[in-house]
């Protein structure tokens, strides 16, 4: 119980937050492998909530610190040390944090700057889009090799993304694969050259932000998909209709329709 309830005496910064060109950058920062612990999940949760309230942030990019790892998932030393009771509640809290990320009404992009395995890939699967750095990074859900299963939503999100049979095959084999293979499978949207990966990632993210796109529209269509996918069709369409009604009263909807009728490019503001 003590390991759960006691606050760390000196809080180590494990998740960094900043905004850059209208995008919130959330960086997992516990080198060398950016493995996550209860404290990292607490800080990630805080960063997600901060990004929700941050009017400067029209989208969110989640990345790992350094050049080699996005994240290698949960800290296996912690898994060996802690009790099953602790690990259950740790998994519960981590899932709640990732669910909050997934349903934040701003577009989220996982920037896979290195290896994304186990819970690292599961974090990325909770983002709306994924981009990866070209090179030797490995991707996969190899938890079966530890005698466990992907416990951060991987069994559910991978099956929804790739279909049940392909997802079961990949997880049961426990293999890791290249970013090019991940793109072929549909796990990754884009692969950028290593020498310009971060610049390309920011350009990719900013295309969904003002003045190029109405970020409120992007965020709400994301909510319609993420929340609506779990609903019966008629309920999902009702959700879509209610979110559309919110957009009808926005400045960007007025600007978009006016620009279309005036045959000019719109200049969106995000409101």
Image: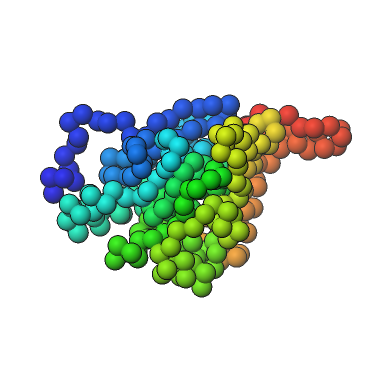
Judged left or right of residue 180, residue 103 is left
The C terminus sits in image quarter: top right
Judged left or right of residue 4, residue 170 is right
Quarter of the image where one finds residue 91: bottom left
Q: Residue furthest left?
A: 2
Q: Nearer the viewer, residue 75 or 46?
A: 75
Q: Nearer the viewer, residue 124 or 144?
A: 144
Residue plotted at (37% across, 35% down): 29
Residue plotted at (25% across, 30% down): 11
Image position, residue 28 (x, y; %): 39, 38
Quarter of the image where one finds residue 56: top right
Image position, residue 267 (x, y; %): 73, 29
Q: Residue furthest bottom?
A: 165
Image position, residue 70 (x, y; %): 44, 43
Q: How many numbered circles does the render carry?
A: 0
Q: From what the image shows, is residue 61 above or below residue 231?
A: above
Q: Can residue 59 be seen in the rendering of this structure?
A: no
Q: Nearer the viewer, residue 125 or 113?
A: 113
Q: Residue furthest front?
A: 136
Q: From what the image shows, is residue 93 above or below residue 9?
A: below
Residue plotted at (17% across, 52% down): 81
The colour scheme is: rainbow
Residue plotted at (50% across, 44% down): 112
Q: Can residue 256 be seen in the rendering of this structure?
A: yes
Image position, residue 190 (x, y; %): 61, 47
């Amino acid at each position: 119980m003590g390991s759960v309830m006691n606050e760390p005496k000196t809080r180590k910064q494990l998740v960094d937050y900043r905004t850059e060109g209208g995008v919130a950058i959330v960086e997992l920062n516990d080198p060398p492998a950016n493995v996550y612990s209860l404290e990292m999940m607490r800080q990630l949760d805080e960063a997600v909530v901060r990004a929700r309230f941050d009017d400067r942030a029209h989208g969110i990019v989640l990345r790992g610190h350094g050049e080699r790892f996005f994240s290698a998932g949960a800290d296996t030393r912690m898994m060996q040390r802690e009790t099953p009771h602790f690990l259950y509640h740790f998994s519960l809290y981590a899932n709640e944090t990732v669910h909050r990320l997934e349903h934040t009404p701003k577009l989220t992009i996982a920037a896979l700057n290195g290896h994304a395995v186990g819970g690292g890939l599961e974090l990325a699967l909770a983002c709306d889009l994924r981009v990866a750095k070209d090179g030797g990074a490995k991707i996969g859900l190899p938890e079966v090799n530890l005698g466990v299963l992907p416990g951060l939503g991987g069994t559910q999100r991978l099956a929804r993304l790739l279909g049940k049979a392909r997802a079961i095959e990949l997880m049961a084999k426990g293999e890791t694969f290249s970013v090019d293979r991940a793109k072929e499978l549909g796990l990754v949207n884009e692969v950028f050259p290593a020498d310009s990966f971060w610049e390309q990632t920011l350009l990719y993210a900013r295309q969904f932000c003002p003045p190029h796109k109405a970020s409120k529209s992007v965020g709400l269509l994301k909510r319609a998909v993420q929340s609506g996918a779990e609903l019966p069709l008629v309920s999902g369409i009702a959700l879509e209709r209610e979110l559309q009604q919110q957009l009808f009263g926005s400045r960007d909807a007025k600007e978009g329709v006016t620009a279309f009728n005036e045959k000019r490019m719109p200049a969106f503001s995000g409101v």
